[in-house]
Image (cartoon, helix red, strand yellow):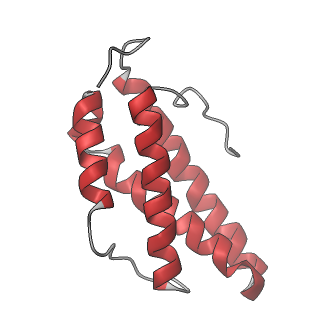
């Protein structure tokens, strides 16, 4: 990796993951209440929750390179076990896209300061 413009802040990354995890759970509940038409929104929120849960308590968040390696390993995974989904294929597609987004954020060390619910 190139020399970052600002130092890695592990506490900020963990806080961002915690807040995104909580927001994803709320988004799942809202999509569930909307019913059949919100199936994709439910799967998207479930994917975000899965990624944040997999990373938020992991020690890899302490180091930028370790988190990048963990994200790369997760992207290379064949399946992502989860229950109560509408469409497994769509869920896995959303997980991979969210992991790629997080990998870009990690590489650039940007975006973790944005902790609002809606992004």
| Vertical arrangement, residue 89 with respect to residue 51, above or below | below
| Vertical arrangement, residue 5 with respect to residue 22, above or below | above
Residue 58, horizontal then vertical, whole percent = 25, 44
Q: Residue at left 77%, top 83%?
A: 37
Label total for image: 0
- The residue positioned farthest toward the front in the image shown: 2
101, 19: nearer the viewer: 101
Q: Residue at left 53%, top 86%?
A: 87
Quadrant containing the N terminus in the rendered view: top left
Horizontally, residue 107 falls left or right of residue 35, namely left
Residue 16, horizontal then vertical, whole percent = 50, 36
89, 46: nearer the viewer: 89
| Vertical arrangement, residue 62 with respect to residue 7, above or below | below
Q: Please identify the quarter of the rendering in which residue 30 is found.
A: bottom right
Residue 71, horizontal then vertical, whole percent = 31, 49
Q: Residue at left 49%, top 55%?
A: 98
Q: Residue at left 40%, top 43%?
A: 103
| Vertical arrangement, residue 15 with respect to residue 79, above or below | above
Q: Please identify the quarter of the rendering in which residue 50 is found.
A: bottom left
53, 47: nearer the viewer: 47
Q: Please identify the quarter of the rendering in which residue 34 is found.
A: bottom right
Residue 99, horizontal then vertical, whole percent = 42, 53
Horizontally, residue 58 falls left or right of residue 97, namely left
Horizontally, residue 115 falls left or right of residue 51, namely right
Quadrant containing the C terminus in the rendered view: top right
């Amino acid at each position: 990796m190139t020399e970052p413009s600002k130092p890695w802040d592990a506490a900020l990354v963990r806080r961002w993951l915690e807040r995104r995890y909580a927001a994803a759970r709320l988004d799942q509940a809202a999509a569930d209440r909307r019913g059949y038409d919100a199936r994709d929104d439910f799967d998207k929120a479930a994917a975000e929750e899965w990624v944040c849960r997999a990373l938020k308590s992991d020690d890899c968040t302490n180091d930028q390179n370790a988190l990048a390696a963990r994200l790369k390993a997760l992207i290379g995974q064949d399946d992502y076990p989860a229950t109560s989904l509408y469409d497994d294929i769509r869920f896995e597609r959303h997980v991979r896209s969210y992991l790629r987004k997080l990998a870009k954020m990690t590489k650039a060390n940007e975006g973790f300061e944005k902790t609002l619910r809606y992004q």
